[in-house]
Image (tube, grey):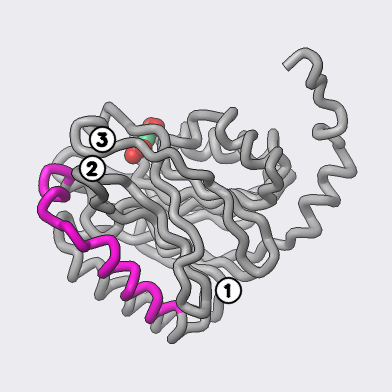
Amino acid sequence: MKIAIFQMDLAFGSPEENIEKVKRWASNMESADVVVLPELWTTGYDLPNLKHMNDHFNQTVNVLKDLAVKHQVHIIGGSIAKSHQENIYNTMPVIDQKGSLVHEYSKLHLFKLMDEHLHLKEGNDDPSFTLDDIHFAGFICYDIRFPEWIRKSVLNGAKAVAVPAEWPAPRIDHWITLLKARAIENQVYVIACNRVGSDHANEFGGHSLIIDPWGKIIAEGSDQEEIIYGEIQAEEVEEIRKRIPIFDDRRVDFY
Ligand SMILES: O=C(O)CCC(=O)C(=O)O
């Protein structure tokens, strides 16, 4: 499965501009089976204005559905603000190459350091979905600091973990270390898309990553805009799990 990570800079509070960029990049990319976008890629962290964007999620998902069909690609659509019953969620849509919305996951852990709890509601979704027979789990940014949440989805069968993010540059070493650890401890692929550029409060660090189940970095972004390509093979997960059988060796009577 060929992956293309769109490591974009985002125009703050300007969905039209960001959507146009995604359309442009999709037209220019090399062939891929799956495109991965960053967290809140249509708006950036323009959190106070999200409440005025009622149908924004559905409208943007419709654009992604058209793109998926046009380019015959699955899209792990980063995340997009979604209004639902007086609340706003930070929600990842997954669209398959036939243009169907096959999954939604709203960020479970809100990041107080960036005021998410003041504007957003935490989700309560199952992170699992399947693309081309590969069992994925999707998490959003701060979620990766909660290894037990990721382990739970791996115990439920996930072989690859997708992580859209807006991770600030000053903690980029945490980003790389945590993602490598999640790959090694769970023996899964990690596919992580971080934005670049800055807004009034933060500079974002890029370094999007594709990491194999042994913890080896297959592809890594710089701190500039680019598409990062890499390939994952589900059989590799079983291979690594045979070599060091941590899932057989767990002491479930103790933890
Ligand atoms: O955990 C971190 O250091 C960054 C998290 C973050 O930026 C986010 O969840 O949006």
On screen, residue 85 versus residue 27, left or right, reads left
Residue under numbered circle 3 = 116
Residue 32, placed above or below residue 210: below
Amino acid type at circle 2 is Asn
**The N terminus sits in image quarter:** bottom right
Inspect this view and state whether residue 179 appears: yes
Q: Which of the two discs, 3 and 2, labels the residue nearer the N terminus?
A: 2
Q: Which of the two discs, 2 and 1, labels the residue nearer the N terminus?
A: 1
Q: Nearer the viewer, mark 3 or mark 2?
A: 2
Residues under numbered marks 2 and 1 in contact, where contact means CB atoms less than 8 Å apart:
no
Residue under numbered circle 1 = 33
The yes-or-no answer for disc 3 within 8 Å of ligand 1 is yes
Residue under numbered circle 2 = 87
- Rendered location of residue 219, percent (x, y): 58, 57
**Residue sitting at x 68%, y 42%:** 156
- Rendered location of residue 72, percent (x, y): 52, 82
**Is the stretch drawn in magenta largely helix, strand or loop?**
helix
Residues under numbered marks 3 and 2 in contact, where contact means CB atoms less than 8 Å apart:
no
* Secondary structure at numbered mark 2: strand
Q: Between marks 3 and 2, how big is the CA–CA gap?
A: 12 Å
* Secondary structure at numbered mark 3: helix
Span highlighted in magenta in the image: 47-68
Q: Between marks 2 and 1, how big is the CA–CA gap?
A: 33 Å
Inspect this view and state whether residue 168 appears: no
On screen, residue 233 versus residue 145, left or right, reads right
Q: Nearer the viewer, mark 1 or mark 3?
A: 3
Q: Nearer the viewer, residue 139 or 27?
A: 139
Amino acid type at circle 3 is Glu
- Rendered location of residue 191, percent (x, y): 55, 53
**Most extreme residue toward the front, as rendered?**
85
